[in-house]
Image: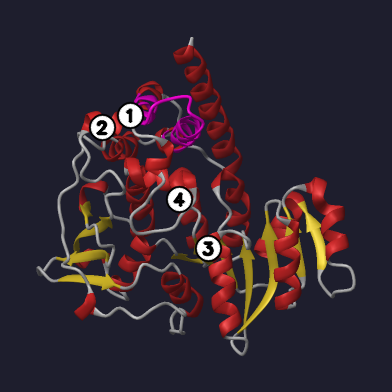
């Protein structure tokens, strides 16, 4: 049986992973689960799967977790040391689904321990891609992408050499504002921005889809995962979200991965890799699909795409600044502090002022991230004044 650790077990990716694992009790054994603060859901999942270790990131809730696990064989832990143990302990396969920079140190711990890491944490490669990939080469860790777009590319590539690739094509739904005019988008409300037409996601990633910053971040991730320069990575808007991404080879062949809009498909692929298991997702019936459309993205209406390419080309700490400033700006928009159009403006200003060198460690990544967030908050205060 493959031993499994799920970092971020109570979020959407974590619960989807648990769903697949529990469908195959003869193949997988859960050894560790973690959560940020949801003690009740974490304890319930730990009891249900007979996990050996449950970790709560919020150390103030450690006693509560202990009480919730009383009478079980599951040990409670908390804080950074507990997360590191869950990441680099006995599990062969680690789902890295902790959101934000809080997931950087556990992901690196799993990579340095040589584990197979199913990566659902965007920040890991956007902010520390070179560090992560170098560490994986050194330890023999396999980093498997869980994002549907990168997983699609991974499936299309198979064992083929990247020397045979002409370009990678990331598909984008276009989000809720795909057909909106710029003037209408500038006054869009948070409720309109989070109303994604195809996917059920959290508020932050839904806004990223509305600005198309999510696709810009994925471009940076793809660069690190597959080792291709930015000019060999394209983005195509595909509103049906059936073709999840494509690979064009030097001979002109294009391979595409298709499937239902269900995150359990890429999760199941990384969980069973190099084999396959049933995910529980609905089958794709092409005879009942709507016509498939593809169109070029409009970088005038969606400047986040241009800003992400700028950050990748700029190098240094620019991707960290891009990610951190975007998070602060999205939070401000959701709180009603700024307009939708101001999100990209804040990011553009931050990138223009970015001068820091590339980080040499995860600690430096976290420090640069913290500094960028502080500058973004100060910029918000100045705008309000």
Question: To which residue does mark 1 refer?
Answer: 187
Which residue is under mark 2? 184
Determine contact: label 2, label 1, CB under 8 Å.
yes
Query: Residue at 59% across / 33% down in the picture?
Result: 367
Instruction: Between residue 303 and residue 384, name the one nearer to us.
Output: 384
Counting from the top left corner in percent of width and height, residue 275 is at: 44, 84
Q: Few, some or many C-alpha atoms within 10 Å of disc 2 (few <14, some 14-19, many ≥20)?
A: few
How far apart are labels 1 and 3 at the CA level?
Answer: 31 Å
Helix, strand or loop under label 2: helix
Say whether disc 3 or disc 2 marks the residue closer to the N-terminus.
3
Q: Earlier in the sequence, mark 4 or mark 3?
A: 3
In front: label 3 or label 2: 2
SS type, badge 1 = loop
Q: Nearer the viewer, residue 358 or 274?
A: 274
First reached walking from the N terminus: tag 4 or tag 1? 4
Under circle 3, the secondary element is helix
How far is the residue under mark 4 from the one under mark 1? 32 Å
Q: CA distance from mark 2 to mark 1?
A: 6 Å
Q: Which residue is mark 4?
A: 125
Please report contact status of discs 2 and 4: CB closer than 8 Å, yes or no: no
Please state the horizontal and vertical placement of residue 258, each as a whole percent of the image: 28, 72
Compared across the picture, whether 101 is left or right of 240 comes to: right
Vertical side of 217 occupied by 358: above or below = above
């Amino acid at each position: 049986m493959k031993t499994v650790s799920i970092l971020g077990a109570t979020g959407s990716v974590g619960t989807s992973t648990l769903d697949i694992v529990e469908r195959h009790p003869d193949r997988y054994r859960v050894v560790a689960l973690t959560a940020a603060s949801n003690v009740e859901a974490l304890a319930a999942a730990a009891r249900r799967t007979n996990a050996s270790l449950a970790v709560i990131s919020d150390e103030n809730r450690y006693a509560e977790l202990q009480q919730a696990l009383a009478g079980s064989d599951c040990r409670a832990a908390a804080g950074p040391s507990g997360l590191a143990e869950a990441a680099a302990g006995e599990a062969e396969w680690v789902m890295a689904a902790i959101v934000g920079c809080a997931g950087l140190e556990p992901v690196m711990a799993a990579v340095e321990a040589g584990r197979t890491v199913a990566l659902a944490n965007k920040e890991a490669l956007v902010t520390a891609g070179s560090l992560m990939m170098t560490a994986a080469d050194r330890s023999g860790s396999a980093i498997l992408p869980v994002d549907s777009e990168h997983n699609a590319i991974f499936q299309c590539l198979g064992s083929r050499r990247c020397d045979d690739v002409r370009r990678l094509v990331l598909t984008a739904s276009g989000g809720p504002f795909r057909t909106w005019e710029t003037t209408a988008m500038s006054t869009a409300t948070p409720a309109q921005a989070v109303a994604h037409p195809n996917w059920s996601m959290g508020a932050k990633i839904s806004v990223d889809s509305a600005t198309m910053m999510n696709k810009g971040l994925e471009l940076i991730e793809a660069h690190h995962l597959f080792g291709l320069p930015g000019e060999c990575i394209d983005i195509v808007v595909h509103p049906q979200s059936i073709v999840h991404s494509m690979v064009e080879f030097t001979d002109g062949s294009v391979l595409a991965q298709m499937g239902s809009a269900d995150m359990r498909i890429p999760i199941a692929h990384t969980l069973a890799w190099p084999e396959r298991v049933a995910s529980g997702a609905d089958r794709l019936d092409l005879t009942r699909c709507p016509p498939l459309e593809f169109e070029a993205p409009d970088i005038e209406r969606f400047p986040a795409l241009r800003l992400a390419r700028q950050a990748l080309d700029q190098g240094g700490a620019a991707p960290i600044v891009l990610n951190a400033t975007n998070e602060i700006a999205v939070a401000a928009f959701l709180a009603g502090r700024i307009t939708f159009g101001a999100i990209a403006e804040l990011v553009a200003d931050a990138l223009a002022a970015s001068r820091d060198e590339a980080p040499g460690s995860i600690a430096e990544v976290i420090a640069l991230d913290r500094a960028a967030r502080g500058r973004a908050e100060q910029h918000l205060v100045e705008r309000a004044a």
